[in-house]
Image: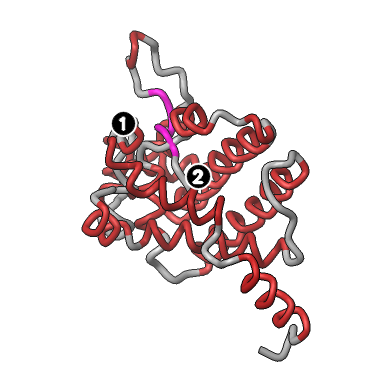
Amino acid sequence: MLNMRSVSTAAGEGGLADDRTAKARLRDAAIACFAENGIAGTTARKVAATAGVSPGLVIHHFGSMEGLRAACDEHVAATIREYKEKAFSRGPSLDVLAALRDSPSGPLMGYLAQVLAGDSPAVAKLVDDLVDDAEGYIQQGVESGMLRPSEDPRGRAVVLTLWSLGALVLHEHLQRLLGVDLTDPEILTDPATTAYIGPVYEIYGEGILEEAFATHAQETLTENRGTV
């Protein structure tokens, strides 16, 4: 499951000065704008106003709105990867509740929900990057003793990543059915979140198939690999 806290420290939050570069402020502002207004509703002027800089700096730093989108994608993917690698490196002793509290959220969930609904080479690259990263940190989880090994590590990474991303794209239905909004920046403080997290860990931790049937199904698929 993908959960992320704020992209960065807001200016003046907790009495701290915002020491990000103008380029970083623009990137973070763009993520927030895309999350709130969607791709079509986000302009260079709107991003610049949110970041508190001149609109010309968008083109200066990123070349175009497409370049800005690419920088946002890279930052979001890197944030998820960093969090997952840190969590899986702790092994079976991981404090799940502490990990949930530490997980990044903020506008990143809303950003993904907006951009993943599109169909473009940029979206395909973002999904590919997320899958590649997932394959790496899932293997890290196997090596640390947290996860079971798989006969098809790449396939497992693809399926798990797309399941998680699919929940984001369909977040409005998840909210309607379970009362949980995955795009809410304050999701981790909402007690209703357990209505989603509980089933996720049940499915991942216990599975849904009886052991005998799971074994039978796996043997059948192995014997007929490539013919189904």
Q: Quadrant of the C terminus?
A: bottom right
Counting other residues with Cα less than 10 Å from the Cα at mark 2, is it few (<14), some (14-19), or many (20 or more)?
many
Front position in the image: 120 or 92: 92
- Image position of 180 (left or right of 218): left
Q: Residue at x 35, y 23 (%)?
A: 10
Residue at 54% x, 58% y: name it: 126
- Per the image, the residue denoted by label 2 is 76
Q: Is residue 139 left or right of residue 191?
A: right
Q: Quadrant of residue 46?
A: top left
Which circle's residue, 1 or 2, is located before the other in the chain?
2
In this view, 14 is above or below 202: above
Residue lying at 42% horizontally and 33% vertically, measured from the top left: 5
> What's under tag 1, amino acid-wise?
Thr
| Boundaries of the magenta span | 4-9
Q: Residues within 10 Å of mark 1 (few under 14, many from 20)?
A: few
Q: Is residue 154 left or right of 167 when viewed as pictured? A: right
Q: Quadrant of residue 128?
A: bottom right
Q: Residue at x 51, y 31 (%)?
A: 99
Q: Is residue 176 visible?
A: yes
> Residue 97: percent from the left, percent from the top?
47, 30
Does the segment drawn in magenta span residue 5? yes
Residue 154 is a magenta residue: no
Three-letter code for the amino acid on which mark 2 is drawn: Val
Which element carries disc 1, helix, strand or loop? helix
| In-front residue for pair 14/227 | 227
Q: Considering depth in this image, is 228 or 16 the residue closer to the camera?
A: 228
Q: Which residue has dot 1 on it?
A: 189
